[in-house]
Image (cartoon, rainbow, N blue to C red):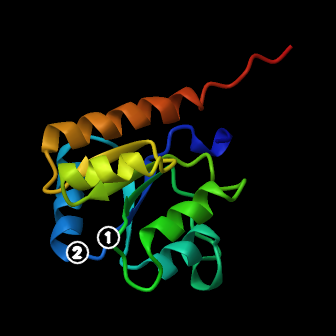
């Protein structure tokens, strides 16, 4: 993260094919007093175009956080995650997986996916906001500029 991050809202990319889950996530973030800008994409293929800044996404800002559903159309969320973590330019972006149940979360943990957190649907507001705040603190820690000698 460079100097261009100082003083701007957190850029959040939500990749979710369920309209109700996306709307709920939007409402939680809006009510959580977290300065952010949310981009919602509906499928894995579009998410990869956005993350690699291809085509109509050539000039989009790099996300500071990715909220990722794994059951996506076109390109599965696991493939999106694999490409993010396998790309040196994207690998540092925190990824939080949105999962259908606690049992599903346990199964995903056993796969040892390289993620920074899990959110179980239906989303618990307090847990969700606590996770985003923790990641925001991590993000802001990267903003501290080294002293110039």
Can residue 105 be spotted in the picture?
A: yes
Query: Which is nearer the eye, 10 or 77?
Result: 77
Quadrant containing the C terminus in the rendered view: top right
134 in relation to 27, above or below? above
Q: Position of residue 136 (x, y in %)?
A: 42, 36
Quadrant containing the N terminus in the rendered view: top right
Question: What kind of element bears circle 2?
Answer: loop
Residue that badge 2 annotates: 18
Q: Residue at x 43, y 68 (%)?
A: 77
Quote the CA–CA distance across marks 2 and 1: 6 Å
* Label 2 packing within 10 angstroms: few (<14), some (14-19), many (20+): few
As drawn, is 102 to the left or to the right of 142? left
Question: What kind of element bears circle 1?
Answer: loop
Tags 2 and 1 in contact by the CB under 8 Å rule? yes
Which image quarter: residue 133? top left
* Label 1 packing within 10 angstroms: few (<14), some (14-19), many (20+): many
Residue that badge 1 annotates: 16
7 in relation to 84, above or below? above
Query: Which is nearer the eye, 5 or 71?
Result: 71
Among all residues in the image, which is located at the extreme top? 149
Q: Residue at x 30, y 57 (%)?
A: 98
Which image quarter: residue 12? bottom left
Q: Position of residue 143 (x, y in %)?
A: 59, 31
Among all residues in the image, which is located at the extreme right? 149
129 in relation to 60, above or below? above
Q: Position of residue 134 (x, y in %)?
A: 37, 31
Q: Residue at x 36, y 54 (%)?
A: 97
Q: Residue at x 37, y 66 (%)?
A: 70
Task: Indicate which disc residue 126 carries.
Answer: none
Can residue 30 be spotted in the picture?
A: no
């Amino acid at each position: 993260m460079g100097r261009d991050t100082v003083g701007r809202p957190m850029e959040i990319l939500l990749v979710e094919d369920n309209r109700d889950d996306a709307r709920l996530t939007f409402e939680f973030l809006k009510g959580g007093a977290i300065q952010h800008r949310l981009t919602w994409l509906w499928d894995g293929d579009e998410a990869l175009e956005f993350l690699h800044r291809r085509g109509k996404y050539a000039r989009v800002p790099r996300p500071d956080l990715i909220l990722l559903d794994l059951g996506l159309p076109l390109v599965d969320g696991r493939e999106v995650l694999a490409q993010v973590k396998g790309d040196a330019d994207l690998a540092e972006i925190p990824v939080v997986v949105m999962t259908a149940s606690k049992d599903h979360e346990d199964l995903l943990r056993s796969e040892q996916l390289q993620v920074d957190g899990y959110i179980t649907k239906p989303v618990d507001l307090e847990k969700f906001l606590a996770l985003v705040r923790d990641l925001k603190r991590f993000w802001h820690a990267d903003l501290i500029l080294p002293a110039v000698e």
